[in-house]
Image (spheres, rainbow, N blue to C red):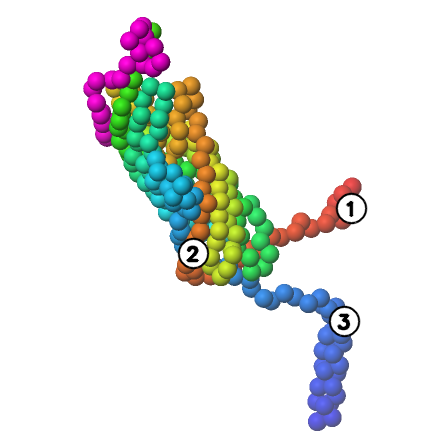
Amino acid sequence: MLRFIISIVLICCLQIGNAQSKPIDTKQKDTVIHKQPYGLRIGVDLSRPTISFFEEEYTGLEFVGDYRLSQKYFAAAEIGNEKRTRQEDLYNFTASGSYIKIGVDYNTYANWYGEQNLIYVGGRYAFSTFSQTINDYQIFNTNRYWTPNSFAEGALGTQEFTGLSAHWLEFVLGVKAELFANIYLGGSIRMGILVANNNPDNFNNLFIPGFNKVTDDSRFGVGYNFSISYFLPFYKKAKKKVEKPKAKSKNEAN
């Protein structure tokens, strides 16, 4: 019996010695898992209704939206309708139609914990279907004996060209900031390049809904929008930690 008790005491002493020989980790470990919301953000462009209010020759409306795919990437789209009447040197015309833009945005902004703001770059494929109507026009003629102060008025009256279409690519640079809970104010500038443009006979498309003004010597166009949107969170996902590179030891550096 005495031998058994002595053996138990020796075993306990060995266990205590091993426990004391192990280093104690005094660093506090972060066990909190930071989760970010994933969902759909939908809104409306504010610039087009504002222009419509101040300009009688223009009406337009655009809806915007994006869906979070990952920590940095968002699927994005815009859909809208525009109608613009313009006076050129020799004719007055009206362009009217709808468009859709689909693409991806990449958020370059590193948010603090709890923030969901975006400073993003992105790209879009855009498609528009529209019509052009010549309201009135003048005939260019170097012999201006009967109309010395202007060109002669055309006699064909109103002409309408339907079933027109255009395709283009857009580069997008924008920002979205959370004003209140799930309410975002955003703005973006866009540069587009025409890929295909279906011109009517004897007339060029000078305004494409969603693309903006078209010039004869360039395929590039510039646009912008200012939006307000609401975020609908569907679920939350843990934020990926960015691992810091380990410092090299002196032996590895040499």
The three-letter code of the residue at mark 2 reads Tyr
> In the rendered structure, which disc, 1 or 3, sits on the residue that comes first in sequence?
3
Measured as percent of width and height from the top left, residue 47 is found at: 43, 43
Label 3 crowd bin: few (<14), some (14–19), many (20+), radius 10 Å: few
Label 3 sits on residue? 21
The three-letter code of the residue at mark 3 reads Ser
> In the rendered structure, which disc, 1 or 2, sits on the residue that comes first in sequence?
2
Q: Is residue 76 visible?
A: no
Q: Is residue 60 above or below residue 243?
A: above
Label 1 crowd bin: few (<14), some (14–19), many (20+), radius 10 Å: few
Distance in Å between CA atoms under marks 1 and 3: 28 Å
Residue at position x 44%, y 48% from top? 227
Quarter holding the N terminus? bottom right
Residue at position x 29%, y 36% from top? 97
User: Are the residues tagged 1 and 3 within 8 Å (C-beta)?
Assistant: no
Q: What secondary structure prevails in the magenta region?
A: loop
Label 2 sits on residue? 230
Select label 1 or label 2 by which is in front: 2
Specify whether 143 is left or right of 22. Answer: left
Q: Is residue 131 above or below residue 182?
A: above
Residue at position x 45%, y 42% from top? 225
Quarter holding the C terminus? top right
Segment colored magenta: 143-164
Element at label 1? helix
Label 1 sits on residue? 251
The three-letter code of the residue at mark 1 reads Asn
